[in-house]
Amino acid sequence: MSPSMSHVRTRGAAFLLVPFLLMLGCKDAAKDAPPPAAQAEDPAAVHPEIWPAPKWPFAKDAALEEKVAALLKKMTVEEKVGQVVQGDIGSITPADMKKYHLGSVLNGGGSSPGNDEWAPPQKWLALADEFYAASIDTSDGGVGIPMIWGTDAMHGHSNIVGAVLFPHNVGLGATRNPKLLADIARVTAEQVRTTGIDWTFAPTVTVPQDDRWGRTYEGYSEDPGVVASYAGVFVKGLQGEPGSSDFLSGHHVISSTKHFLADGGTDQGRDQGDAKIPETTLRDIHNAGYVPAIESGVQTIMISFSSWNGVKHHGDKGLITDVLKKRMNFDGFTVGDWNAHGQVPGCTNDNCPQAINAGLDMYMAPDSWRGLYENLVKQVKDGTVPMERLDDAVTRILRVKFRAGLFEAGPPSKRALAGDYKMLAAPEQRALARDAVRQSLVLLKNNGALLPLAANKHVLVTGDGADSISKQSGGWTITWQGTGLKNADFPGGTSVWGGVRSATKAAGGSAELSTDGSYKKKPDVAIVVFGENPYAEFQGDLKVLTLPGSMTQHLDIMKKLQDEKIPVVAILLSGRPLWQNRELNLANAYVAAWLPGTEGGGISDVLFRKKDGAVNYDFTGKLSYSWPRDAAAAPLNVGQDGYDPLFPFGFGGSYAEPADLAPLSEDPGIAPELMSVGSFLDKGLPVQPWSLRVTNGADITRVSATPLEAIGGRVKVTAVDDTVQEGARRFVFAGDGPATVEISGEGAADLSREANGDVMLLVRLRRDADAPKDLTLGVTCGEGCGAQLPFADTLAGVASGKWTTVGVPLKCFAKAGADVSKVNRPLALASSSKLDVSLSQVKLGTVADKVYACN
Ligand code: BGC
Ligand code: BGC
């Protein structure tokens, strides 16, 4: 192979056509003149020379290189491999770190010290000290290299209870204010430092192209220009100015831009999916943020779970090595995503030499680190992984550790800002976050100039989002999914209601709160707050860009208020634009507030006038994502053919001009997303397309009308109450032979992403008699495939007569032999003995009263 061709992947029938390659530099030529089919090139071949070549802001530093080389020379293979493997604090102890010389830990969205998401910051700092001490321990004769700890400080130090949380990136995109972003980055770094953590997996520089993607809110914009305008300043805000003495000094942290590449370009917006796009789109749209990030000296880049034209990024040497490192001059290290290497063909979570050989420098191996470590040691020794490649990976990691001053920094608790917990929520931080909220709001309708409101009136604040800081904050908030939280989990935070209450009180007005639109005193105006409930990653993928079809209460409230001639201000809390024509019609004024975080006062700041009647703060936010005209079509973005949004990219009203909106068509053109993904049984009824049945293996009775005698009277089924009347089904087994209650489907569900992500099968149940010893709970995956877990002890441990949500990690089924990629029965509860159990809900989720242990 000639040197100029060395970048071309030789996979399958990949041919290099030199003239075509040259043409690829020009978008239109590539589009207009596809290569003849017979000579078609591998669609996942890269051409590094057509990619930009940003300048890496660090000159070769001979002293640094010498230090790194000297250290590397002293390291054993085991120590080197330890540096390239990162475990999750939920699955690794300091003792493990010491034994295996691991170079890094992370806390995933669902992990925390002592497995307590509410652990105080002191516990985080103490654990950082323990890992640090383990990493530098040289009692076994090793070199002792300080570890680094990575966290997802996505919108502030968002794993920590009490930290001020900023709007998610979707809202920050609307501000178009890079200076604000720099400040947020600086403050976030300070927050992270208080807990002794030195690395954040941020900023996300994705450029989401299909808002059905569950991670749309992690992206600043569908427009590469907006993303690029933030990426560099955010990296500098976190790390400091490269080349200055301030770089990675005390109050800064290491940054990681993610997810390389085109995580937001996947087909139909599917998380961890495949981006079926030309190389030029990959370069011009999705790579936009990496160029300024590299020029700003970003020290780490996270590789995406997703694929490009069928090739998983974790195995893509062309993109990681030839484009990112060689062409784009990235000289920091690449880090993997959560077991994402396991998705490379031929790999498993604990065995994947392909990834390091493709250019991955540090594996994120949360629970698989030990097996992966052991396999890598073997693979280096037998040459599967060339020593040169391992040395390069370790060199890159050590450079970053030296630049960060870790070898002199001492224990995390002795570093700048450590333990200074007031820096999690300093008044300056609240003010900054509140300002960010104001700037992120986008005014979509203001008929008759209803806004700004006079604050000396009587105001009703209602809707399920009125007083919910959790709903304001979305996913990646304390817990991974942001679910299971109450206002008390946000000390010092302010809901929308809290902000309105203060604003009206200060002006001599009054306010009242109700979730259902009712009121004690007829209000002059009502503010209705509603929208998406928190989600993260694939749990937020949608088929249709609507609120769930079951979410209708806010519409009823708005109709009722309109009938009562009370003007309505609608506030949408959401991670993306949605089809909202009915809500837009029902509201007199309508504001897209995105996911504003803990400082809800920023909303009332803009909604209300000053006492003297003047505007307090005007709306300045502009859409950074186009707003869909109908729910049916795949959303199109600015610049794409056929672009016809309801509100275009850049739209945003203000008080300076009228913002009236004529009535819109209310035909969504498609059924709203009725079936919430991952719900199998709801209020005692099977969720389409699943069915609820009782079987003894031979006979099957479908549970439809109740009461019912199933399988020849062996199981009696009745309707009982849970949260609503007859919202559950009670199953009484006579105990005279095998019987199973099951949820079954014609097709199969692929739950592999959920199993990898520590998602559980949540079963809300009530036990009314003792649990039989032979009771099992399982899933099946087609003929002869499945896993039945012993369930007697778990059920016995649930208080009798009390509704309880039991969570069974999907991983437990996989460990017991089920193929979770094709689950056709997500629940099978079986016993031959007497049983009396009621079920109201079966779904996927992360919040349970009781978690099944399968280790
Ligand atoms: C972790 C997250 C991770 C996800 C992977 C969860 O269990 O807590 O941090 O992103 O799994 O999909
Ligand atoms: C997510 C990343 C995150 C990591 C660690 C993954 O599942 O995709 O964005 O940084 O988990 O929590």
Image: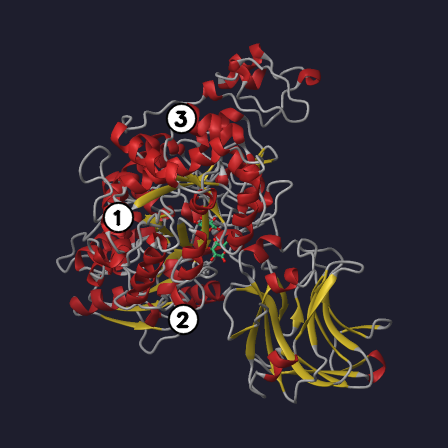
Are circles 3 and 1 on residues that touch, CB within 8 Å? no
Name the kind of residue labelled 2 in the image.
Answer: Gly
Name the kind of residue labelled 3 in the image.
Answer: Met
Asked if the residue at label 1 sits under 8 Å from ligand 2, the reply is: no
Q: Position of residue 484 (x, y in %)?
A: 44, 68
Label 1: element kind: helix
> Residue at 19% across / 52% down in the picture?
615
Precedes in sequence: disc 3 or disc 1: 1
> Residue at 57% across / 16% down in the picture?
32
Label 2: element kind: loop
> Residue at 24% across / 55% down in the picture?
434
Q: Which residue is tagged 2? A: 517
Q: Where is residue 568 in the image (x, y as percent from the top left)?
A: 36, 61
Using a 10 Å C-alpha cutoff, classify the residue at mark 3 as few (fewer than 14 neighbours), some (14 to 19) or many (20 or more). Answer: many
Name the foreground residue: 87 vs 582.
87
Instruction: Answer yes or no: is residue 647 visible.
Output: yes
Q: Which residue is tagged 1? A: 184
Alpha-carbon span between mark 3 and mark 1 = 27 Å
Instruction: Report the side of 451 relative to 692 (left or right).
Output: left
